[in-house]
Image (tube, helix red, strand yellow):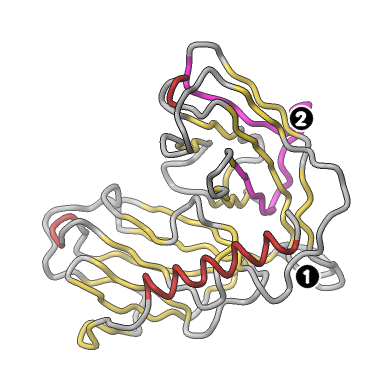
Amino acid sequence: MNRKQFCGIALGLVATAVAGCGGGGDDNNRNDTESINNPGAGSVTDLSRMTVFPGQKDGAFIGQNTGFVLSWATATDAPRTTRVALYRFLEARGGETRSDFREDIRIAGNTVSSWSVRKQSDLFAGGVFYLDVSTDLDRKRYAFIVGGGRSIAPSDEPTRAADVNTPGTTIGLGNLTVRYSGDATGAVNIPVATPFVLDFGAETNAPARFTVRLRRYKERRGTEEPSANEQNVDVSHDAGTGQWTVRRSDNFLLERGATYILEVVTDGETQRNYVFLTEG
């Protein structure tokens, strides 16, 4: 990804985030605790009906002033109490130790079934963050990379992307779901042996051609400069299915305590960028 693409994605997502998360919340629903209290709740105790903005496919690169929106179709679809935390994911690089720093956040009610979650100051440019949402019986985590500011330098390396031709006839990536080990909980703390499955439901639901990249993202840390180097990947497919499996070449494991970006793009459509944080 070159600098122009990086900054374009970041600026586009900043605009979207401002439109989706700006002001307009009910001041009576504002609080400085890290939980959503929903007086209109039914008997729901899980998070299966929750929608999070920005979505997983837009995880890299969000804007520094991005807020996160947690919403349900109705108040009765949401749990009575939902705990929310935002963490800065810091790798052990450049002489610095590995840590997860819990940020101060502010929660604001937008409607009876929608709440905004925002760091009390801007997100750190180039930083990796994850949103941790839970009830007593369920938990989901979402990973993000912040664009702008200290963007990575363009790479002169030849691309290591995998171009995939399929029997599909669909235009775009509207049928795509990315599956991986632990996806019931989310894209944080995934096993290092994880393969990524691109699931279109059926072969014909895939576009005729798409491109896959897997990047190892490293933010500026201690004495180390930022980077987002492409990995060598293999893409396999069982004929007759709608699934394509992406792995690091030669079955190399993912690094521990690391950040990866899975990129999927097809002709004429905005690139999808999925962020994953590995265990360890």
The stretch of residues the image draws in magenta is: 241-264
Crowd around label 2: few <14 · some 14–19 · many ≥20 (10 Å): few
Q: Is residue 2 magenta?
A: no
Q: Look at the numbered disc 2 and give the secondary structure of its residue.
A: helix
Give residue 249's mark. Answer: 2
The amino acid sitting under disc 1 is Arg
Give residue 221's mark. Answer: 1
The amino acid sitting under disc 2 is Ser
Q: Nearer the viewer, residue 142 or 175?
A: 175
Where residue 105 sits in the image (x, y, percent)?
44, 79
Where residue 38 sits in the image (x, y, percent)?
18, 69
Where residue 143 sits in the image (x, y, percent)?
53, 57
Q: Quadrant of residue 221?
A: bottom right
Q: Please identify, in this view, whether the residue under mark 2 or under mark 1 is nearer the observer.
A: 2
Total of numbered circles in the picture? 2
Q: Look at the numbered disc 1 and give the secondary structure of its residue.
A: loop
Q: Nearer the viewer, residue 86 or 241?
A: 241
